[in-house]
Image: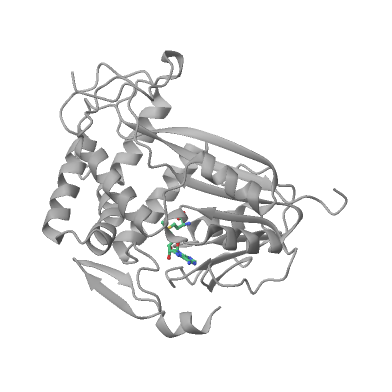
């Protein structure tokens, strides 16, 4: 039995039941609006075999923006939908007219949302021009740095959505004060983040598990630059401090591999593992080489071992996907 932390296990009734019939062989998923922004928008850095946007500020975005990353984001969108049982958001929206998606990546959420709400205008913003040109007529994209003052009108949007951008933002209070200013009274903001707290309830994950070691290194690096990964508590506090009310937290278990017996969780785990190779590299390469000054070859080795551990069906790891939403009080409140 592997050495593990004694604390932090879920109660037995909350634990994910392991599929005992699963083969313990490793699973190989490969079988199966600003001036300065516009100046730097087509400048790239090629580093450690990946393409990053250069931007006007070093380390603005630590994730690559090449085709491999774009494919990863599109695949991850399907996983995010599956985690929310096919829903694009959990905020209780009623006939929204104006929707904003900040840090929209390839724009896939904004496009799907425009299809879902054909009467709404949906705008996606991002630092990188990686969105398609052919989009629904009620959807458009703008290049924008979320950390600069918003150019949108106050009290404008019925819904503002931000997904998996926690690692990219340095000053959350500032960004969320702008989000609050531009949300219509009674409108909603929703923050969705894949948690980085790696858990295991049956001691199959060792303290020195390579996957966890890698995640902990990335967290250490992000902590150093003041961008700690988001937890549900942090997300709730951010929204409440910004002035949003009725803040609601929904945490969904996300198995890291197809080890659960339950069919839904098994599919979620398999989907997570499928995107793992690209995800591990995207999250680790720039953070560990640029911030912790680790050697590229050493980081490659960490990524390789980390993927090997993730593919080990005998290790029952999971994390949480957090969705936290809140409402801007109405004018009469
Ligand atoms: C991990 S991706 C998530 C993309 C998308 N939200 C999704 O869930 O598919 C993070 C995105 O945030 C963008 N980003 C990072 N910093 C940003 C900033 N300061 N302003 C706007 N977008 C930013 C990146 O360019 C990248 O496309």
Q: Is residue 126 above or below residue 39?
A: above
Pick whichever, 247 or 109, lies toward us: 247
Q: Residue at coordinates 39% horizontally, 55% vertically from top-left?
A: 73
Q: Residue at coordinates 58% horizontally, 58% vertically from top-left?
A: 173
Pick whichever, 55 or 110, lies toward us: 55
Q: Residue at coordinates 53% horizontally, 80% vertically from top-left?
A: 34
Residue 267, quarter of picture: top left
Residue 264, quarter of picture: top left
Q: Is residue 194 above or below residue 209?
A: below
Q: Position of residue 136 (x, y in %)?
A: 58, 64
Pick whichever, 316 or 223, lies toward us: 223
Q: Is residue 252 above or below residue 296?
A: above
Q: Is residue 241 above or below residue 55?
A: above
Q: Could you tell whether 110 is left or right of 318 in the image? A: right
Q: Could you tell whether 273 is left or right of 330 in the image? A: left
Q: Could you tell whether 293 is left or right of 221 in the image? A: left
Q: Position of residue 299 (x, y in %)?
A: 17, 54
Tell me which colouring the rendered structure shows. one colour
Ligand 1 found in image quarter = bottom left
């Amino acid at each position: 039995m592997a050495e593990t932390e004694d604390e932090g296990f879920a109660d037995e009734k909350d634990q994910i039941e392991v599929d005992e019939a699963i083969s313990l062989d490793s699973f190989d998923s490969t079988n199966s609006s600003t001036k300065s922004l516009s100046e730097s928008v087509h400048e790239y850095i090629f580093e450690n075999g990946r393409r990053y946007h250069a931007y006007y500020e070093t380390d603005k975005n630590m994730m690559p923006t090449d085709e491999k990353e774009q494919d990863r984001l599109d695949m991850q969108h399907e996983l995010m939908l599956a985690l929310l049982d096919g829903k694009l958001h959990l905020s209780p929206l009623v006939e929204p007219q104006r929707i904003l998606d900040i840090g929209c990546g390839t724009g896939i959420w904004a496009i799907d949302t425009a299809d879902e709400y054909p009467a709404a205008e949906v705008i996606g913003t991002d630092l990188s021009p990686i969105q398609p040109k052919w989009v629904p007529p009620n959807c458009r994209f703008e290049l924008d740095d979320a950390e600069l003052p918003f150019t949108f009108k106050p009290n404008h949007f019925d819904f503002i959505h931000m997904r998996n951008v926690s690692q990219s933002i340095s000053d959350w209070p500032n960004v969320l004060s702008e989000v609050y200013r531009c949300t219509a009274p009674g409108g909603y903001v929703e923050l969705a983040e894949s948690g980085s707290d790696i858990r295991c309830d049956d001691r199959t994950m060792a303290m020195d598990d390579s996957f966890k070691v890698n995640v902990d290194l990335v967290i250490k690096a992000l902590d150093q630059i003041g961008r700690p990964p988001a937890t549900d508590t942090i997300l709730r506090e951010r929204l409440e401090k910004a002035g949003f009310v009725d803040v609601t937290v929904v945490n969904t278990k996300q198995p890291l591999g197809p080890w659960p017996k339950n069919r839904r969780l098994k599919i979620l785990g398999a989907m997570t593992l499928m995107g793992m190779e690209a995800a591990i590299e995207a999250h680790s390469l720039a953070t560990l080489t640029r911030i912790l000054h680790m050697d590229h070859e050493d980081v490659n080795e960490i990524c390789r071992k980390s993927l090997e551990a993730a593919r080990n069906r005998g290790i029952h790891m999971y994390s949480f996907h957090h969705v936290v939403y809140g409402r801007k009080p109405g004018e009469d409140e």
